[in-house]
Image (spheres, helix red, strand yellow):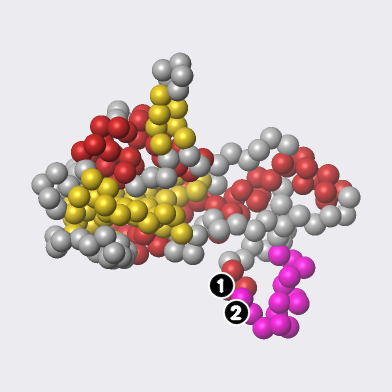
């Protein structure tokens, strides 16, 4: 639990503040506020957690790398990097995980399968998933050094519901009735994207495809597939 709260409250682009009425208010993107709200619901204290360690490096979310990270200087003088991002990418950088007893154990095939099944199940329910992970850095960390990209310990997978705005499905239906084809482009996991597109009435009998696969196709294949892509 301690390392989870450390991750949630330090590796974030959001903020927890008290407004004019003395009530707690969470600032940031919908994704950041959802994770911070989860941390608060677990009994975490944002400001207390931020005072424990010193933040020495921040790498904001990068849409190409699909991850963000920070490095903390711990009270005992050691360093720890936290990262979060697209589940498949962060999980691939992990070789250990925190089990249900709070112990750090090696990632074996069964554990990887279980975590990947969790990611897929969340995605099929139209949840955006993020993996949270950390790695201890035993050497002196220089601010100019990059944040490590592997050797991480998986803390867990979170699933976030990004509710479809009211009226979207109806708007898509109106466009269809007017002869307008609505297509969806997103950086989400393909299973999440398909679930949301079905919810909106965008994905019916057409095709959903990922960018890398699309860009590898021949011109002939593209001409055939483009009209079917939703």
Residue 36 among those drawn in magenta: no
How many numbered discs, if any? 2
Residue drawn 60% across the image and 79% down it: 216
* Lateral position of residue 165 relative to residue 40, left or right: right
Q: Mark 2 points at which residue?
A: 216
Q: What predominant SS class does the magenta segment belong to?
A: helix
Question: Is residue 83 found left or right of 95 in the rendered image?
Answer: right
Q: Mark 1 and 2 residues: CB-CB less than 8 Å, in contact?
A: yes
Q: In which quarter of the image is residue 66?
A: bottom left
Cα distance, mark 1 to mark 2? 6 Å
Quadrant for the N terminus, please: top left
Does residue 159 sit above or below 191 in this rendering? above
Residue 22 visible in the current orientation: yes
Mark 1 element type: helix
Identify the residue at image location x=43%, y=40%.
14
Tag 1 residue: 212
Q: What is the span of residues highlighted in magenta in the rendered image?
A: 215-229
Residue at 59% from the left image edge and 50% from the top image edge? 195
Residue 157, given in percent of the width and then of the height, sits at: 37, 49
């Amino acid at each position: 639990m301690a390392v989870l709260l450390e991750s949630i409250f330090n590796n974030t682009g959001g903020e927890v503040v008290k407004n004019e009425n003395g009530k707690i208010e969470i600032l940031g993107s919908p994704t950041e506020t959802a994770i911070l709200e989860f941390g608060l619901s677990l009994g975490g204290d944002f400001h207390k957690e931020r005072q424990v360690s010193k933040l020495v490096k921040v790498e904001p979310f990068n849409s190409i790398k699909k991850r963000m990270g920070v490095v903390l200087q711990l009270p005992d003088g050691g360093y720890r990097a936290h990262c979060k991002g697209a589940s498949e990418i962060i999980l691939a950088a992990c070789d250990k995980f925190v089990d249900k007893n709070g112990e750090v154990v090696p990632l074996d095939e069964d554990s990887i399968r279980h975590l990947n099944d969790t990611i897929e199940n969340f995605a099929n329910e139209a949840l955006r998933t993020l993996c949270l992970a950390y790695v201890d850095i035993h050497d002196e960390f220089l601010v100019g050094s990059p944040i490590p990209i592997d050797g991480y310990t998986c803390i867990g997978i979170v699933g976030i519901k990004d509710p479809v705005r009211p009226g979207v499905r109806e708007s898509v239906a109106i466009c269809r009735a007017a002869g307008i084809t609505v297509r969806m482009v997103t950086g989400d996991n393909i299973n999440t994207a398909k679930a949301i597109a079905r919810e909106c009435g965008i994905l019916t009998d057409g095709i959903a495809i990922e960018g890398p696969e699309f860009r590898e196709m021949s011109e002939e294949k593209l001409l055939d597939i483009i009209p079917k892509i939703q």
